[in-house]
Image (cartoon, grey):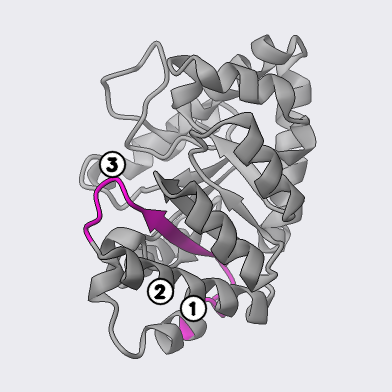
Amino acid sequence: MIDTHCHLYDKKLINDLDNIINNAQNANITKMICIGDSIETSKQSIQISETYNQIYASFGIHPHEAKEAPNSYLDIIKKNVAHKKVVAIGEIGLDYHYNFSEPKIQKLVFREQLELAKELDLPAVVHCRDADEDLYNVISESNHSKGVIHCFASDTNFAKKIIDLGFHISFTGMITFVKHLEQVIKDIDLKHILIETDSPYLAPIPYRGKTNQPAYVKQIAETIADIKNISIEKVDNITTKNALSLFNKLSN
C-alpha cells in the first residue's frame, strides 16, 4: 500500500518521524510520497527522502504560495526534480476558497509548473478547491495527461472530466465522513484511483480530530473496499499499481 500524499515535514510530524515510519511499516504501507508545497518544504521533503528508503518527494509551489514564487522558481524546480527520489512536480494548482494569492497569479504559476511537468515528463500533483472550471481549463490547455487531483472533493461529473484528460483522482480520509464522495467512488473505476492521507490533515474516522499519519491510509483503502463491495486486497493491489505507474520513479 502506498500513501501518495503526506506532509512529513509538518511540525506535528517531523519530531516523531521514526515512530510514524514504523507505524506505517506495521500497517503494510511500503512507500510514502512527501509532498512539498513551497521551495522550502520541497527541499525538506528531499532531505526526509534521503533519510528514509521508503519515502519519496515532490517539488512544487502551492497556490497559497504562488505570490511568493521568486523569478527563478522554474529553474529551481527543474534543478531539484532531477534528484533520484523526486517523483513529481507538486503540490500545484488553484485554491479560490482562501485566495491567499490572487487568482491571476495562481493561474500563471500553476500553468507554468504544469508546462514544466509536461516538458520533463513528470506527473503533476494538483490541488483544487472551489476552482473546478479554471483548473480543468488550465490542464486541458496544457495537454499534459500525467497527474492526479489530490484530496478529491468534487462530484462525479468533474471526476470523469479530469479522468478524460488522463489524470487520476486521489481520496483522503474525507471519504469516511463526507457523504457525497461515496457516490463518486461508486461511479469511478478503481484503475483511476489513488489513496492518500494528506497527513497531518484530514484523519479518517475513527481518528478524526487527531493528527493524521501515513499508517491511516489503510482506513481509506478499507472504506473504498466497503463502498465498492470488493476486498481490501484488491483495492491495495490496484491502487498500488496505479501509483507505481503514475509515479514511475517510485519503481527505481
Q: Which mark is residue 109?
A: 2
Query: What is the three-letter code of the residue carrying label 3?
Result: Leu
Determine the residue positioned at 69% across, 61% down. Answer: 146
Q: Which mark is residue 13?
A: 3
Out of 67 and 238, give the one closest to the viewer.
67
Percent of width and height locating residue 122: 64, 69
Q: Looking at the image, do the residues carrying marks 3 and 2 touch, with CB atoms under 8 Å apart?
A: no
Query: What is the three-letter code of the residue carrying label 1?
Result: Glu
Q: Quadrant of the N terminus?
A: top right
User: Looking at the image, is mark 3 or mark 2 earlier in the sequence?
Assistant: 3
Determine the residue positioned at 77% across, 13% down. Answer: 230
Query: Magenta part of the protein: which range?
Result: 79-100
User: Looking at the image, is mark 1 or mark 3 earlier in the sequence?
Assistant: 3
- Number of marks in the rendered image: 3
168 shown above or below 233: below
Disc 1: which residue: 112
User: Is residue 11 toward the left or the right of residue 222 in the image?
Assistant: left
Percent of width and height locating residue 104: 34, 70
Q: Looking at the image, do the residues carrying marks 1 and 2 touch, with CB atoms under 8 Å apart?
A: yes
Q: Residues within 10 Å of mark 2 (few under 14, many from 20)?
A: many
